[in-house]
């Protein structure tokens, strides 16, 4: 009897169900006696023993369904060693529930924080396999995470839709794309959507350069400008602040602006005297059905995850590297962030065709 646990942790995305399906189908096709337990609502389910036995029918018809059928929640890694309000040792509780079900392996789907806890459980002696999920595409050691392409499609569609109204009214529009610490999603959606200015966390912007880019388009007879702005876009002035100072500045800004895009919009308006509109697709970028690319990616990642379990090759992240599915040791990647290289080829090519990054 092979007994496997599954959980999805952190923010949801479109392809979590597809990835779980890939693992389940890979195992069920090759193992006669199999039990799969789904821990409900992420690590919370593993901590408090909230789970259910999943049947083959649970994995049927979910390839195209977004979200996660077993729920998710955010359990910050930095608090995993901190007892809960009742004094419960979370790490010890997770281990006890793992052993109570006599699991052979725990399949964990999630982003950076999820991965760090997965590695912690590996260090505690549990057999784990990690599948890299995040629309931010910021997990180190894999070329792409599932959820990323689906989110690109949605963010790009938002920019596409803004194009027509921006052109009709000769306005400056800002489309705010998800991404607090990294700008992969904004970069790709901005390029795909034909944004004129792209502002990323990795490339601090100069508001004067942003304004100059808008003015240059106006002088060239182009009546509108579209900015793709990451949630975590930061000015050159703010980039000079310490983490403590910047955090204090953000708390103050939130009293006046819902997000960074609204502050940028006001600064542009003050300098140009022109109206600037802001559109925030928000959590729509996490929703809907997974793209065909993500469905294929998850099927491949899931199949390799199943193979790793059958071969007892635990403690690995299943990654995409140069279009090949690889098994990467968790200890080599956990806690590392994959950021956009300001001098990388994609950014250089974007600048070559005239896209401004405000630097």
Image: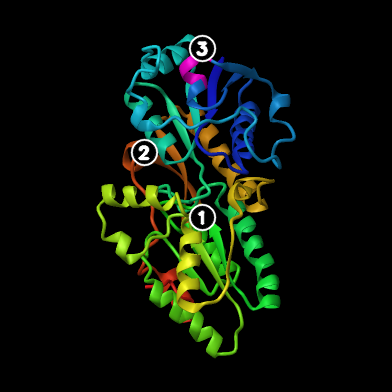
Question: Could one spot residue 42 in this view of the protein?
Answer: yes
Q: Nearer the viewer, mark 1 or mark 3?
A: 3
> In this view of the protein, which residue sits in the foreground, 90 or 204?
204
Main SS of the magenta part reads helix
Q: Nearer the viewer, mark 2 or mark 3?
A: 3
Query: The C terminus is located in which quarter?
Result: bottom left
From mark 2 to mark 3, how far is it between C-alphas? 25 Å
For the record, the magenta segment spans 45-49
**Dot 3: element:** loop
User: Residue 266, how many percent across, how many down?
Assistant: 49, 66
Q: Which residue is mark 1?
A: 323
Report the residue at 49% width, 52% height from top.
144
Q: Which residue is mark 2?
A: 329
Classify 136 as above or below 305.
Answer: below
Q: Which residue is mark 3?
A: 101
**Dot 2: element:** strand
């Amino acid at each position: 009897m092979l007994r496997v646990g599954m959980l999805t942790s952190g923010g949801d995305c479109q392809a979590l169900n597809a990835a779980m399906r890939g693992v389940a189908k890979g195992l069920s096709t090759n193992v006669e006696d199999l039990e799969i337990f789904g821990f409900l609502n992420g690590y919370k389910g593993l901590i408090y023993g909230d789970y259910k036995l999943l049947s083959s029918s649970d994995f049927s018809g979910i390839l195209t369904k977004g979200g996660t059928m077993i729920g998710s929640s955010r359990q910050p890694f930095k608090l995993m060693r901190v007892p809960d309000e009742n004094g419960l040792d979370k790490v010890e509780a997770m281990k006890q529930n793992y052993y109570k079900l006599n699991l052979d392996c725990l399949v964990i789907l999630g982003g950076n924080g999820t991965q760090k806890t997965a590695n912690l459980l590996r260090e505690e002696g549990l057999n784990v396999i990690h599948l890299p999920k995040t629309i931010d595409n910021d997990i180190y050691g894999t070329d792409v995470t599932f959820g990323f392409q689906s989110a690109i499609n949605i963010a790009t569609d938002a920019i596409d839709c803004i194009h027509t109204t921006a052109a009709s009214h000769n306005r400056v529009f800002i489309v705010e794309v998800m991404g607090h610490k990294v700008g992969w999603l904004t970069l790709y959606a901005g390029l795909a959507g034909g944004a004129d200015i792209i502002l990323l966390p990795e490339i601090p912007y100069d508001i004067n350069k942003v304004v100059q880019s808008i003015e240059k388009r106006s002088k060239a007879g182009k009546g509108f400008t579209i900015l793709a702005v990451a949630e975590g876009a930061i000015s050159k002035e703010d980039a000079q602040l310490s983490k403590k100072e910047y955090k204090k500045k953000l708390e103050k800004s939130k009293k006046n602006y819902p997000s960074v895009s609204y502050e940028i919009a006001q600064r542009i308006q003050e300098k140009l005297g022109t109206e600037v509109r802001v559109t925030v697709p928000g959590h729509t970028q996490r929703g809907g059905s997974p793209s065909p690319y993500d469905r294929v990616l998850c099927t491949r990642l899931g199949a390799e995850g199943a193979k790793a379990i059958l071969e007892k090759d635990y403690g690995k992240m299943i990654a995409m590297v140069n279009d090949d599915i690889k098994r990467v040791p968790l200890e080599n990647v956990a806690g590392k962030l994959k950021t956009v290289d300001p001098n990388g080829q994609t950014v250089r090519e974007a600048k070559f065709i005239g896209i401004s990054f405000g630097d």
